[in-house]
């Protein structure tokens, strides 16, 4: 099978969980992949032979909260792999401590805002500028910005208010960039995972197990990182071509309002 070339996908928070699964699926789909993560140690990508991909993958140590480092990262990715055609905003943190909303501390709130919202916004801004700059050169490529938020962008998680607020902010960020970039045919999407088996959800595993077993998730199971990754790969490939500014729920029905 002839190798497919789709340009370069930059995936933040790619050291494990959803981010690593996304990187793997985009690599198999024909993207060169830049894996950016705060942690230095990252799992290697494994090529999927039947996809016929001869792409490249590079890892970068990156602190999303340090917005002054964003341009340097983008310069290094372009020098190593070429022009970025897809950004996946996956990096994010939850509350330092889950608990009463009235006890939420500024330290936790500021950390969530700095990483989940501020860092993500300004990285998106930088990538968007480059996508517009290179629009003529990449006219044949599908270009996209995909942000991983959460079911808590809409569903109240009272014990992690800072997390919910920042994820809700990403919903509006997606719409804003979708509006700004639509004329250049740069698609912008939000993906809202539900209860996914990752390190972030481990501390609440018992509570989530009970929630799922008692019907909280209509599909009756935990989500896996691959469930989210497959949805993102579909969007990144441009398989929903006449859409932008929308969100996709990947939660096994969690987001369905039932009475």
Image (cartoon, helix red, strand yellow):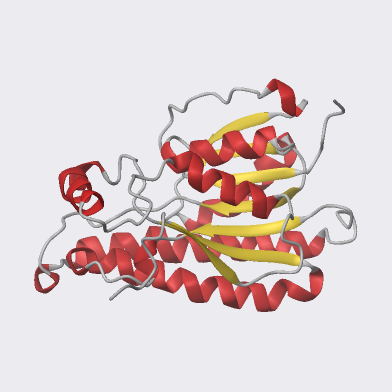
Instruction: Look at the picture and state if 42 lies above or below 166.
Output: above
Residue 130 in the image, given as x and y percentages of width and height: 73, 59
Please give the name of the residue rendered at 76% of the width and 63% of the height, measured from the top-left corner.
Answer: 241
Q: Nearer the viewer, residue 160 or 253?
A: 253
Residue 97 in the image, given as x and y percentages of width and height: 16, 55
Q: Nearer the viewer, residue 178 or 66?
A: 178
Hey, which quadrant is residue 166 in on the image? Answer: bottom left
Examine the rendering and report whether any part of residue 60 can be seen: yes
The N terminus appears in which quarter of the rendering?
Answer: top right
Hey, which quadrant is residue 131 in on the image? Answer: bottom right
Hey, which quadrant is residue 7 in on the image? Answer: top right
Residue 49 in the image, given as x and y percentages of width and height: 71, 21
Instruction: Look at the picture and state if 181 lies above or below 62.
Output: below
Residue 2 relative to residue 63: left or right: right
Please give the name of the residue rendered at 43% of the width and 30% of the height, measured from the top-left corner.
Answer: 40
Q: Nearer the viewer, residue 37 or 206?
A: 206
Number of numbered markers: 0
Instruction: Look at the picture and state if 148 lies above or below 19.
Output: below
Residue 161 relative to residue 230: left or right: left
Residue 193 in the image, given as x and y percentages of width and height: 43, 55
Please give the name of the residue rendered at 42% of the width and 41% of the height, measured from the top-left corner.
Answer: 224
């Amino acid at each position: 099978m002839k190798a497919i070339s789709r340009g370069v996908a930059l995936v933040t928070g790619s050291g494990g969980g959803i981010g690593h699964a996304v990187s793997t699926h985009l690599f198999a789909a024909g993207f060169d992949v830049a894996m950016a993560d705060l942690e230095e140690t990252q799992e290697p990508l494994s090529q999927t032979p039947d996809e016929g991909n001869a792409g490249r993958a590079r890892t970068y140590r990156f602190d999303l909260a340090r917005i002054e480092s964003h341009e340097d990262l983008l310069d290094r990715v372009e020098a190593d792999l070429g022009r970025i055609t897809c950004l996946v905003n996956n990096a994010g943190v939850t509350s330092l401590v889950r608990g009463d909303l009235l006890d939420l501390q500024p330290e936790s709130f500021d950390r969530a805002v700095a990483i989940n919202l501020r860092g993500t916004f300004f990285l998106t801004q930088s990538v968007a500028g480059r996508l517009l700059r290179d629009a003529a050169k990449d006219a044949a490529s599908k270009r996209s910005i995909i942000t991983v938020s959460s079911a808590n962008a809409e569903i109240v998680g009272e014990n992690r208010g800072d997390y919910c607020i920042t994820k809700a902010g990403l919903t509006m960020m997606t719409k804003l960039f979708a509006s700004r970039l639509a004329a250049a045919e740069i698609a912008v999407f939000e993906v809202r995972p539900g209860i996914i088996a990752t390190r972030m959800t481990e501390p609440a595993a018992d509570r989530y197990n009970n929630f799922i077993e008692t019907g909280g998730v209509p599909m009756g199971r935990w989500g896996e990182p691959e469930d989210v990754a497959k949805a993102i790969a579909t969007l990144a490939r441009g398989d929903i071509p006449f859409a932008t500014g929308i969100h996709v729920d990947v939660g096994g029905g969690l987001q369905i309002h039932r009475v």
